[in-house]
Structures are given as C-alpha cells and as structure tokens.
Image (cartoon, rainbow, N blue to C red):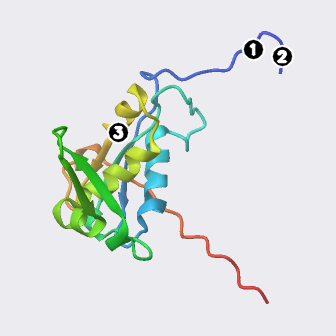
Amino acid sequence: MAIGTKTPFTSREAADRKWLIVDIAGETLGRACTVIASALRGKHKATFTPHDDAGDFVIVVNAAKVKLTGKKWSTKLYYKHSLFPGGLSTFTAEQMAARHPDELIRRAVWGMLPKGPLGRRLYRKLKVYANDKHNHSAQQPAKLEIPAERKPKAKA
C-alpha cells in the first residue's frame, strides 16, 4: 500500500441500496435469518462499512411457513414484559407463530443486528409478511437466494 492512500468509505447517501425479496417457506429459521441480517448490513457488497448503513432493503414472504429443527416448536420460549410488576408473559415458538408468524423472523433478525442507533436504522429496512402477498412490487425487488444447507459428507 502506498503512503498517503486512504481507505475509501461509502457514505450513507451514496450507498447503492436495492430491494431484495426472500421466500422462506420451508427454510430453517436461523439459517434464513443470517442471510437476511447480512443483506440488511450490506456484508455482501464490496463497499461494506461496519459503522455505516450501506445495506439493502429486505422483503420476507411466507414467514408463517418457516421451520424449526428438533423440539424447538414446543421448547423455545419468547418473553414479553408489560413493565408492570408481575407482567412477564412467556410464549412458546408454536404459540408465537399462531398469533404473529412474522414476529419469529423479526426477533431472530433483531438478535443478529448491531445494537444501538445503527441496528435500529437497519431493522427499519426489514419488511416481513406472513404470506406471499406484499405491497412492494413498485420497488421491483430482486430475488435473494438462501444457500442450501451444508450437510457433512458421509465417511466411507
């Protein structure tokens, strides 16, 4: 590297944001959400800057058809508190999916984003829908593929 050269950083205004759509029907929750969180942050771009918002908008459809492995439907717990004494509510993943199927995706992606003002700005670019209908067709979203699960090779 030559002396005096600087690393170029893309500003938030100059970021080339696209709209991506991902269908997560039949996909595993955690594996799908890692791809979504990475796209929201912009890690798939050569101009990724860790301290700035250069990611894309992500539309998630068929959130109600996501799958969980093992016994997580009955053992994975989600918590909500009303901020009043004794106001803790606990839900299993099955109960959460029955009431708010998009909330499983939202909470999983939120846990993978940075905390603070940057994470909140990134989180606002996530649009989740329980079925295959969405109202973002005017943005002409490109398809975001979730890679197939890598299975360990069988030993001979």
Disc 3 packing (10 Å; few <14; some 14–19; many ≥20) = many
Disc 1 packing (10 Å; few <14; some 14–19; many ≥20) = few
Q: As rendered, which of 142 and 96 lies closer to the eye?
A: 96
* Image: 109 above or below 149: above
Mark 1 near mark 2, Cβ–Cβ under 8 Å?
yes
Residue 76 locus on image (x, y percent):
36, 65
Pointer 2: what residue?
2
In what element is the residue under mark 2? loop
Pointer 1: what residue?
5
- Quadrant in which the C terminus appears: bottom right
Taking the spot 18% from the left edge, 50% from the top edge, the residue there is: 135
Pointer 3: what residue?
123
Residue 51 locus on image (x, y percent):
52, 26
In what element is the residue under mark 1? loop
* Image: 143 above or below 139: below
Going by the numbered disc 3, the residue's amino acid type is Tyr
User: In which quarter of the view is residue 48 placed?
Assistant: top right
